[in-house]
Image (cartoon, grey):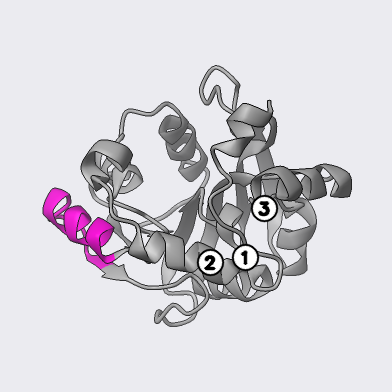
Amino acid sequence: MSILYNSYRMFTGTKKNEKYWKERQIDWKTGYWTPEHPHREMIIKALGRFNFGSVFEIGCASGANLQRIHQAYPQTQFGGMDINAEAIALAKQLLPQAQILDVGQADDIYFSDKSIDVILTDATLIYIDRDKIDKVMKEITRIARNGIVLCEFHSQSWWRRLGLRFVSHLNAYDYEKLLDKYDCYDIQFTKIPADIWPVLPWMEFGWIISARI
């Protein structure tokens, strides 16, 4: 278990997380352009709960989720943002149909209140520390008109969340409490099966979470 967890021990703290992802230089197409990954089908299914004409992903990388959304809902307006400029530059090449793709941070989004039907995150909030998660959730729930879909680490156990933080420097949250705090309702949780994401910590903490606003 420790070997699998140790692959995540690259950095700690929100500022270091931001610096790491902002400056990360990799082949974003080879490393992150995986529209066929099976967890994305779970995201598509969760989106089906809502009546929506627009979706915006926070932390979209090179846009693999947005590609699947466009395939499944071709009439939907879609876009995303990411902290890494190279990832967004590739996303613009791969997704010319997108309404907006821009560089930005999750705690300071320039959209007006209730301007997007559904807000999506996928392995983004796991890098947001406790000192900033409230600010990020305020932005997400401020912008979302109908609902949110999160693919993140969830646990109701304070000890398990602390343990994850200790061994990996990644963050799980109790999303039932956190979303209720921001007046979300009809919150639904679907565990990501181990055969879909057979690595730690995803096997233990990975969930698809959706809620209405």
Amino acid at circle 2: Lys
Is residue 201 visible in the rendered image? The answer is no
Gap between marks 3 and 2 measured at Cα: 14 Å
Q: Residue at x 47, y 54 (%)?
A: 120
* Residue sitting nearer the eye, 82 or 39: 82
Amino acid at circle 1: Gly
Q: Residues within 10 Å of mark 2 (few under 14, many from 20)?
A: few
Q: Which of marks 3 and 2 is in front?
A: 2
What residue does disc 1 label? 13
How many circles with numbers are drawn on the protein?
A: 3
Horizontal relation, residue 112 to residue 210: left or right: left
SS for tag 1?
Answer: loop
Q: Does the magenta stretch include residue 186?
A: no
N-term-proximal mark, 3 vs 2: 2
How far from the left and from the top, in percent, is residue 168? 65, 45
SS for tag 2?
Answer: helix
What residue does disc 3 label? 171
SS for tag 3?
Answer: loop
Position of residue 201 relative to residue 18, above or below, is above
Horizontal relation, residue 22 to residue 136: left or right: left
Position of residue 1 relative to residue 16, above or below, is above
